[in-house]
Image (cartoon, rainbow, N blue to C red):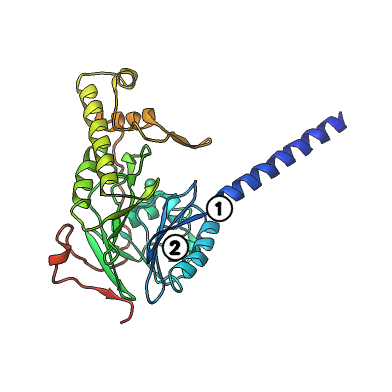
Amino acid sequence: MARGVGAAVAVVILLAGIGAVWLYTGVTSFEVERVNDDVYVVTNGIAGNVGVLRTELGAVVVDTMTFRLQGEQLRELAEELGGGPTQAIVNTHYHRDHTHGNPAFALGARFVATQRTRDYLVYLDADYWDGAAAGTLPNRTFDESHEMKIGGKTIRSYHPGPGHTGGDLVVLFVEDRVLHAGDLLFNREYPFIDVRAGGSTRAWDAALSRILRLEFDTVIPGHGPVTDRDGLLGFQRFLRELWSEVEAAVKAGKSLEETLAAVDLSEDADFEVRSIPFVMTRDRDFVIRLAYAEASGELRPIAVPRSTAGRRVPGPELGRAAAAKDTEMEDLRS
Ligand SMILES: [Zn+2]
């Protein structure tokens, strides 16, 4: 009997060990792709895509993945790729797979995000951002747009309206004509729509139209492979199709089960199903359920109070960036 228990314990320990090695390998294996001379994307299967911009003074990092351990690796990688220590970190939105690496970066660095994103971090993810981690919360916040000039590069961030959450931003590396779209673009994948945190399938379409007014050629999505303007347009067509089909079903009084059976999409033909074991599977049913919950009013945004603002710096208006004259710029050389 005792020997049987001992063997069972040994098997459990062995399996836990294999699981830990599998998880560690999954968490720490990065792929680096050079997007152009000064822009890189760092990818990992269980985190959002990270953008690294090289400047004369060092790196600008967009998003920091899911774990502090990943943040530590990113910090070293960014220093290597970005020409020196990280000068600024931009968080595209509050989800942990884009922000939880922040605490690995230096306290006092510039952390840029929308004020909404800061609010969600502070109120929806309070446990993580307690203690020392609070020093790496966004400390440069804005509502519409923000601009920095660092080591010969211009970095503009815009909040184009609700979509994936209510506080997403996109980042434009102006000279390189590269846009990091965060999770406003899931490229050839089914998206998560965070309705509780102000996300909306209905409103996402308009946010993409505003993004398409910016001047860029290459797009780094929050998830999926690097793409271009056509990638954004394809994703917009998918969202339009999803919303119009689901909204029509809700207006016709269909139940969720009837809607799942009735909705027939075509714009997702080349989408990949993604799943994180025990967490979620992002497939067609997943997005139909979310759109249904939004259209039927079952799922509504929760009220989140405004947190203490970071230092607020206005930037150019979306779509009229080139014409903006009264932009107050942050120049790290000054
Ligand atoms: Zn997200």
Q: In the rendered image, which residue does mark 1 sit on?
A: 29
Local crowd at mark 1 within 10 Å, few (<14), some, or many (≥20)?
A: few
Query: Residue drawn at (43%, 34%), measured in percent from left and top?
Result: 273
Q: Which is in the foreground here, disc 2 or disc 1?
A: 1
Q: What element carries label 2?
A: helix
Q: What residue type is labelled 1?
A: Ser
Q: What residue type is labelled 2?
A: Ala
Q: Where is residue 7 in the image (x, y as percent from the top left)?
A: 81, 34
Q: Where is residue 218 in the image (x, y as percent from the top left)?
A: 30, 55
Local crowd at mark 2 within 10 Å, few (<14), some, or many (≥20)?
A: some
Residue 290 lies left or right of residue 103; in this view the side is: left
Q: In the rendered image, which residue does mark 2 sit on?
A: 134
Q: Quadrant of the N terminus?
A: top right
**Ligand 1 within 8 Å of the CB at mark 1:** no
Residue 89 lies left or right of residue 218; in this view the side is: right
Residue 94 lies left or right of residue 278; in this view the side is: left
> Residue 315 falls in which quadrant of the image?
bottom left
